[in-house]
Image: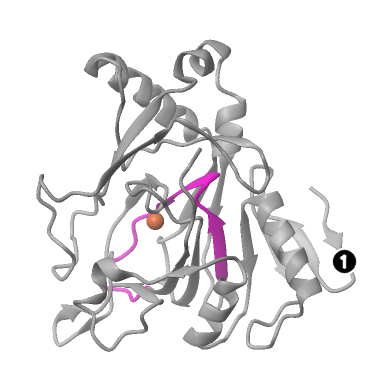
Amino acid sequence: MTSTTTSRLEIRPLSPALGAEIRGVDLAQAIDDETFAEILRAWHDHGLILLRGQSFSEDQQVEFGRRFGEVAPWSRFAAKEKGRHPYIMLVTNLKENGEFVGSLPEGEIEFHSDGIYIEQPSAGTMLHAVAIPSRGGQTAFASMYKAYETLPADMKAKLEGLKARHAFTYNSQKQNENDEKKTAADVASYDHPVFRTHPATGRRALYVNRLMTERIVGLPDDESRAILDKLFTHIETPAFIYEHEWQVGDVLLWDNRCLVHARRDFPAQELRLMRRLTIAGEKPA
Ligand SMILES: [Fe+2]
């Protein structure tokens, strides 16, 4: 792991598996095209970029997100969240008048890829840390490039060309009462290839996860279950993982096409507040 210093930026890998910190960018200021090209390259090279110590408005966050692609409105929750920015979802346990004001307020969330249960899942997700608890609440990331590249040859051959079915679910025990209640009939669900090719890097990645993947399509139930359990354990190999310890002011942008992420538990009585936006993606292939 060596740092790269360009004309403007310092790019420092965060772990052997994935991720890079970029220094020398102030997101409250305009970013010229040449600087942005370096940021974009770092995102593609490392799957995740971190910019620390940022203080910027919600509109500036959306403006930065739009450099990477179309920013998606968070329509699933928007109707219940009147008066909030249409593109910035609050991931927080903040309460007003005894009610959670944001989404996914509490608890651990297992490894997943945002939006995998729809036809065109999010390409990227950006979180800006406004308040963090004194302990816990880390976000862990696993490289699905590494997971794919290290799969045994017989497993690769077995799964080549197959699809997996994914469904909208969050295992958090204490769901926000304002979030949609899921019923069997209206859970969003979609089948995607078990292996996908990243449209920008051309690299192949494993594309299943513990939280949202239900089955391998076309295999008997018990075989599908056994294979998925093996894959989930494989994905959580420590050498594939970077675990982020949040600081207030952090901006993280990760690529859902080649990483999965998980949230560690944290004390429910301590405030955690993240400003989240997602960048629209393409149909996985
Ligand atoms: Fe997520």
Along the horizontal axis of the image, is 263 left or right of 250? left
Q: Position of residue 144 (x, y in %)?
A: 54, 38
Nearer-the-camera pick, 244 or 136: 244
Along the horizontal axis of the image, is 89 left or right of 39? left
Q: Residue 85's image quarter?
A: bottom left
Q: Position of residue 232 (x, y in %)?
A: 41, 31
Nearer-the-camera pick, 189 or 93: 189
- Which residue is at a point 68% across and 88% down the rendered structure image? 29
Q: Is residue 219 visible?
A: yes
Along the horizontal axis of the image, is 96 left or right of 181? right
Q: Is residue 239 visible?
A: no
Q: Position of residue 169 (x, y in %)?
A: 24, 49
For this orientation, the residue located farthest to the right is 7
Q: Is residue 154 magenta?
A: no
Compared with 29, 156 (above or below) is: above
For this orientation, the residue located farthest to the top is 154
Nearer-the-camera pick, 17 or 34: 34
Nearer-the-camera pick, 218 or 135: 218
| Residue density around tag 1, few if under 14, some if 14–19, many if 20 or more, within 10 Å | few
Dot 1 amino acid type: Thr
How is the protein colored in the picture? one colour
Ligand 1 rendered quadrant: bottom left
- Which residue is at a point 35% across and 75% down the rendered structure image? 90
Along the horizontal axis of the image, is 135 left or right of 48? left
Q: Which residue is mark 1?
A: 6
The total of numbered circles placed on residues is: 1
Q: Residue 264's image quarter?
A: bottom left
**Range drawn in magenta:** 251-272
Compared with 5, 132 (above or below) is: below
Secondary structure under tag 1 reads loop
- Which residue is at a point 62% across and 79% down the rendered structure image? 53
